[in-house]
Image (cartoon, rainbow, N blue to C red):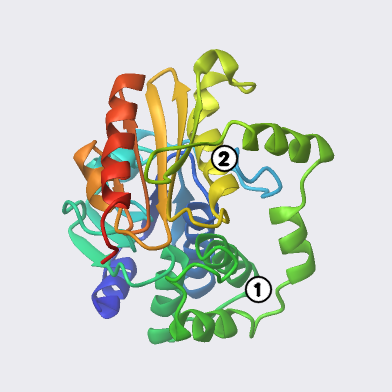
Amino acid sequence: MMFRQALKLIKKYDTVIIHRHSHPDGDALGSQMGLAQLIKDNFPKKTVYMVGDVATRLPFVEVTFDEIPDETYKNALAVILDCGSSKLICDERYKLAAATLRFDHHIFCEKIADLDVIDSTFESACGLVTMFAKECKLRLSPASATSLYMGMVTDSGRFVFDSTTARTFQLAAFLLSQPIDLNTLYYNLYADDFSKILEDADNMHKIRFTPNNVAYIYTAKEDLKEDSDAAPVVSSGMVSLMHDIKGVFIWVNFTEGDDGVHVELRSNRYNINPIAVKYGGGGHKKASGCTVPDKGTAMRLLDDLDALSATKPE
């Protein structure tokens, strides 16, 4: 692991600009906020910026993203978090930076930064950043610990997904050495309005199955209750409705948006990542995503998943 090289790079620059993937989930946002606070706590003379789009998935998180001119990047370090593909990075101006650093836990598909710190065995980017803090003996504050814990718990599915390991709990314990208000955090993450619960129940009635028992939901743009630009967030949320169906080992959600059909693929037994990559996406072995141009392409992807479901798991 290249934690010492990463720390050396952070120490070298007075300005650090932190990026992550667009439409941030708990891990992207948690790692961004957690690392920003970690740097501020340990290097108070540095100027740290966070850039990116609004975190609509996590409205309870109070965060303001910085609007900075291009020249800010001239003598700065750009850090990219939780992003396996360059086209998903929230602000492409990272390319203007004097140097770039990436922390990521996705399956490697392309080199993005001058220094890539990548390990797909971590359950979350937050877990990777937490290990960085621990190994480099950096001072951890409650604010940083809370953000990092949020990403760790959300990307591990509340420590249920099989990406969870003994190391996950060791790092969670390290974060919990700080006074994290778990009751408030879990309430904010998982409590829903009753109207949202009823909406989820309606969407469950849309679940269909392929011949080999791949579960899927397809939502056309005209049936999307939110604005069509919210399709990535909707798709990510709806895929979880299918994860506990007995006898279903692959499930996928399709949501039409202005830029195509957003696809979220999941499995608890199969490596579905190659199919996501085939259609221009990526992610993890059992949790990946992509965007395809139309419904016809989406259905071909579904056929590929159905064929995979007919085989024996790895």
Mark identifier at residue 228 = none
Element marked by disc 1: helix
Let me know if residue 245 appears in the view.
yes
Is residue 127 or residue 79 the one in the foreground?
127
Taking the view exactly as shown, the residue that stands out farthest to the right is 194
Taking the view exactly as shown, the residue that stands out farthest to the top is 222
- Where residue 64 appears, as percent x and y from the top left, is 60, 43
Mark 2 closeness class: few <14, some 14–19, many ≥20 residues within 10 Å = many
Mark 1 closeness class: few <14, some 14–19, many ≥20 residues within 10 Å = some
Mark identifier at residue 238 = 2
The answer to whether residue 66 is left or right of residue 93 is right
Is residue 51 or residue 146 the one in the foreground?
146
Q: Which residue is drawn at 58% across and 79% down?
A: 175
Q: Residue at x 52, y 49 (%)?
A: 25
- Where residue 72 appears, as percent x and y from the top left, is 35, 42
Q: What residue type is labelled 1?
A: Pro
Is residue 185 or residue 33 the one in the foreground?
185
Please identify the quadrant where the N terminus is shown. bottom left
Q: Name the residue under label 1.
A: 142
Q: Which corner quadrant of the image does residue 298 belong to?
A: top left
Q: What residue type is labelled 2?
A: Met
Taking the view exactly as shown, the residue that stands out farthest to the front is 211
N-terminal of the pair, mark 2 or mark 1, is: 1
The answer to whether residue 192 is left or right of residue 70 is right
Element marked by disc 2: helix
Let me know if residue 94 appears in the view.
no
Q: Residue at x 17, y 58 (%)?
A: 114
Looking at the rendered image, the disc whose residue lies closer to the viewer, 2 or 1, is 2
